[in-house]
């Protein structure tokens, strides 16, 4: 689709909120120029994505009044997302091109606006002027310096304000070419500083934030192999005969793999869907030295002669994500067409026939954008890929006990680790399923617990395939010299079903016994979500003592607990981290 | 005329069949100042020509647009 198609869509939908099945989004738009064309393109593009926007734009030249007045239509119109674009145009003298104070005031106003909403505010950075009176000495230009400083201030502000995000217009201008984005007649005659194509490019970038907001970000790339990950057909040429590696066209394929690995490293899950013999592909992974992607990078692998749409469904189920989270990349237009027609939720980009265009195609997809990346995101693709290998073991072992034994699970225990309070607090806040009491503790409260004499044990869990990180905690509060209470016991659901919780409890019982305690009290507080933890205490022989409201209270002698927990998951290893 | 018709149809939201020489801002409510600006820039881009401001302002109907494009060497039959 191109610009005219989007305009057509915007016209067709004029005023008719035909939102059946479509996702709605309320957008506030704040600019310092005539933005009606921008609104129209934004609307048309979002409609093409199945998103129905309701746009409130601050009237021309009134951004100042609206931002400053909490009674303004802007403030009175809560949006799902706000886009702010101030063009500090070097071709038009204004307070944006001369007045540092103006930027400071503007950013203060933006800050105020951000603070009154929890919805994301996406502010476009200021376009850096490289052209002007100073020519090659542009770095000396007062305007250049002013804009650089304004961008730095904006950056500082976005670090201070959680819901303020910066959209980098300079990256976009670089992609488009600064010479190709301006409309000078538009600027001087109508106060429209950008041409339509740039406004469309801007709209496409902004829309990726909206997709992220609506949970439409893609999470997984499903790949064909022959003529996609490498050149040629491995079944015919053998593992060393495929085109991959230092010369054309192998170099292009190899760098496509590098680009995919970069995506994997930022948390995009990879999977394989290929018509091939599994043995042939195994040989490539084992023998071809030019392969960048290894078998352990893939979270699901389908090598068979089934139709690819069927495989796609299985892959989505195996990874446990929606079909609408998948991107399918295949050089064969027949397969692309099949998947597109049978599974319209899967994104199936056109792949140009020549492999040198694969990387640019991948980069221009623009479907993986998120608001930010957390530590977990970095690890995500690896965790999914590790999970496939765990399941392989599960399928090849006879019972759960053997499976757990084959995983070589290890728990590294820490006690009262103040350096980890951020993670400890986060676990109490985020863990809903395996959580006996679901007490939420802020970082400050965790500190206070330790100061008050509570014992906080946490475990870092790993197995032969990877590291789960700190995923299990117990908070224990001494009642008297003999009795100690299990205030909190929780475990992240991604380590459930591996015998970790019993082993951790066994460790706690021995440790508390060693400290001279005789009795452990505990409680189960039912919530909407913590059913998985419901029978945990009774399965270890805890005795129910009483019940008040919904809370069930338990107690057990530590020697009993040690012996009861003993026979669970003996294969799980425990180590203590000395602090 | 197809390329030009396509632009007018998309920008104004008018059926291609209804686009003829007499089409004008007077008889087409969607031909407002906003869409006029979009029309000019899309026509310039499609025919790789540039209008000056006075030329743009002198346009009274669709046939004026055709004459203007032709006078700039653009091929409206493409």
Image (cartoon, coloured by chain):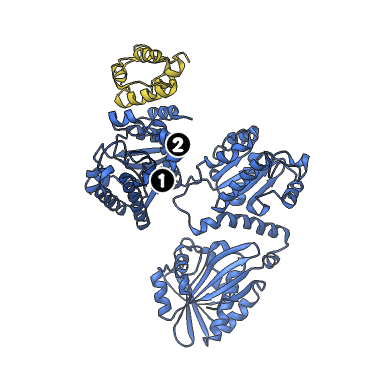
Chain colours: A blue, B yellow
- Which chain is home to disc 1? A
Do discs 2 and 1 share a chain? yes
Q: Compare residues A273 and A351 and report the one nearer the observer.
A: A351
- Circle 1 sits on which residue? A168
Tell me the SS state at disc 1: loop
Question: At 38% from the left edge and 13% from the top edge, which residue is drawn?
Answer: B71
The answer to whether the residue labelled 2 contacts the one labelled 1, judged by CB atoms less than 8 Å apart, is no
Question: At 40% from the left edge and 24% from the top edge, which residue is drawn?
Answer: B42
- Labelled disc at residue A176: 2
- How many other residues sit within 10 Å of disc 2, few (<14), some (14-19) or many (≥20)? some
- Which chain is home to disc 2? A
Q: Compare residues A331 and A157 and report the one nearer the observer.
A: A157
Residue A74, above or below B20: below
Label 2 vs 1, first from the N-terminus:
1
- How far is mark 2 from mark 1, CA to CA? 13 Å
Q: Measured from the top left, where is residue A365 in percent x and y?
A: 52, 40
């Amino acid at each position: 689709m191109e610009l005219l198609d989007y305009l057509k869509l915007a016209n067709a939908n004029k005023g008719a909120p035909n939102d059946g099945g479509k996702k709605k989004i309320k957008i506030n738009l704040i600019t310092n120029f005539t933005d009606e064309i921008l609104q129209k393109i934004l609307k048309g593009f979002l409609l093409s994505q199945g998103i129905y926007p309701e746009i409130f734009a601050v009237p021309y030249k009134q951004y100042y009044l609206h931002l400053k007045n909490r009674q303004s239509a802007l403030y009175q119109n809560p949006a799902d997302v706000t886009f702010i674009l101030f063009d500090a145009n070097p071709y038009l003298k204004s307070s944006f091109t001369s007045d540092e104070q103006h930027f400071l005031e503007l950013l203060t106003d933006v800050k105020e606006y951000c603070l009154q909403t929890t919805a994301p505010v996406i502010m476009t950075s200021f376009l850096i002027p490289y052209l002007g009176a100073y020519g090659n000495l542009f770095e000396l230009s007062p305007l250049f310096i002013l804009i650089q400083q304004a961008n730095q201030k904006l950056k500082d502000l976005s670090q201070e304000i959680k819901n303020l995000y910066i959209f980098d217009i300079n990256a976009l201008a670089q992609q488009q070419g600064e010479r190709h984005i301006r409309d000078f007649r538009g600027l001087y005659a109508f106060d429209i500083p950008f041409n339509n194509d740039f406004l469309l490019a801007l709209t496409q970038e902004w829309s990726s934030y909206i997709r992220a907001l609506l949970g439409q970000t893609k999470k997984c790339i499903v790949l064909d192999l022959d003529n996609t990950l490498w050149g040629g057909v491995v079944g015919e040429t053998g593992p060393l005969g495929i085109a991959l590696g230092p010369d054309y066209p192998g170099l292009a394929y190899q760098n496509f793999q590098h680009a995919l690995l970069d995506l994997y490293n930022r948390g995009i899950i990879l999977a394989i869907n290929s018509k091939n013999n599994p043995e042939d592909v195994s040989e490539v992974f084992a023998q071809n030295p030019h392969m960048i992607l290894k078998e352990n990078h893939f979270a699901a692998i389908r090598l068979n002669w089934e139709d690819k749409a069927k495989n796609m469904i299985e892959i989505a189920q195996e990874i446990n994500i929606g079909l609408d989270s998948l991107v399918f990349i295949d050089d064969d237009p027949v397969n692309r067409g099949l998947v597109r027609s049978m599974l319209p939720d899967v994104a199936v980009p056109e792949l140009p026939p020549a492999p040198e265009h694969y990387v640019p195609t991948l980069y221009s997809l623009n479907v993986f954008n998120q608001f930010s990346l957390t530590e977990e995101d970095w690890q995500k693709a690896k965790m999914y890929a590790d999970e496939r290998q765990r399941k392989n073991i599960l399928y090849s072992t006879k019972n759960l006990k053997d499976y757990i034994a084959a995983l070589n699970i290890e728990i590294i225990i820490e006690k009262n680790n103040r350096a980890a309070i951020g993670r400890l607090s986060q676990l109490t806040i985020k863990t809903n399923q395996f959580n006996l009491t679901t007490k939420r503790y802020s970082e400050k409260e965790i500190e206070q617990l330790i100061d008050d004499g509570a014992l906080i044990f946490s475990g870092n869990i790993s197995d032969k395939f990877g590291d789960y990180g700190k995923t299990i905690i117990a908070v224990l509060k001494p009642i008297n010299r003999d009795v100690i209470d299990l205030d909190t016991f929780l475990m992240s659901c991604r380590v459930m079903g591996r015998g970790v919780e019993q082993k951790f409890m066994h460790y706690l019982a021995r440790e508390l016994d060693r400290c001279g305690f005789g009795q452990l009290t505990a409680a189960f507080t039912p919530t909407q979500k913590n059913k998985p933890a419901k029978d945990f205490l009774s399965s270890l022989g805890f005795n129910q003592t009483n019940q008040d409201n919904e809370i069930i209270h338990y107690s057990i002698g530590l020697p009993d607990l040690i012996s009861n927990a003993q026979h669970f998951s003996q294969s799980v290893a425990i180590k203590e981290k000395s602090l | 005329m197809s390329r030009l018709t396509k632009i007018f149809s998309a920008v104004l939201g008018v059926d291609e069949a209804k686009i003829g020489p007499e089409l004008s801002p007077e008889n087409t409510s969607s031909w407002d100042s906003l869409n006029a600006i979009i029309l000019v820039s899309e026509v310039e881009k499609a025919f790789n020509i540039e209008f000056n401001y006075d030329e743009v302002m002198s346009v009274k109907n669709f046939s004026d647009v055709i004459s203007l494009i032709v006078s700039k060497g653009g091929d409206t039959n493409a």
